Image (cartoon, rainbow, N blue to C red):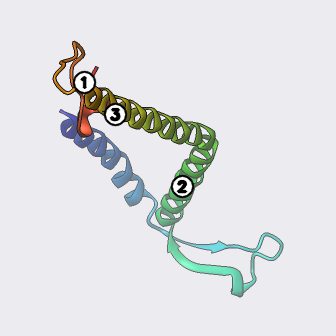
Amino acid sequence: MTRFIKNIILLAIAVVLVPLSVANRHAVSLSLNPFDPQDPRLTIPDIPLFWVIFASLGVGILVGGLGAWAKQGRWRKEARVKRREADKWHREVDQLREQTEAMAPGATSSAPKLSGPDSRHAA
């Protein structure tokens, strides 16, 4: 289902981008010097306009993604701290369980025995 939705979205994007590319295929000169547009050192001559449009969209997506990633740094740090704390508590529980089992080897506890990698997710 996810693959189907992804393909529908990509098809919609292609339906928009292909006509945009065909309509804007004439050559333009991209000047990177705002003070002297005729400066040949900072001018990219004769590139299709749709390349300029797509490159600016791509740069905008990258900058927006980096900005969102940087903004979420606090939450990622908090998640790392909480994960370490949870791992510490899980290790302590495992140690206490081993100690109680060693103290009374014949006794069975009423709590379910949790061990292995899935012990963190069971409850």
- The disc placed on residue 72 is none
- The residue that appears at 21% across and 25% down in the rendered structure is 113
Residue 102 in picture, x, y percent from top left:
27, 32
Q: Nearer the viewer, residue 6 or 93?
A: 93
Amino acid tagged 1? Ala
> Quadrant where the C terminus lies?
top left
Is residue 5 among what the camera can see? no
Comes first in the chain, label 2 or label 1: 2
| 37 vs 89: above or below | below
Which residue is label 1 attached to?
A: 104
Comes first in the chain, label 1 or label 3: 3
| 68 vs 97: above or below | below
Say which of marks 2 and 3 sits in front. 3
Residue 81 is drawn in which quadrant?
Answer: top right
Q: How crowded is mark 1: few (under 14 residues within 10 Å), some or many (20 or more)?
A: few
Comes first in the chain, label 2 or label 3: 2
Say which of marks 2 and 1 sits in front. 1
Amino acid tagged 3? Asp
User: Tag 2's secondary structure?
Assistant: helix
Residue 119 in picture, x, y percent from top left:
27, 31
Which residue is label 3 attached to?
A: 94
- The disc placed on residue 62 is 2
Circles 2 and 3 in contact, beta carbons < 8 Å? no
- The residue that appears at 20% across and 40% down in the rendered structure is 3
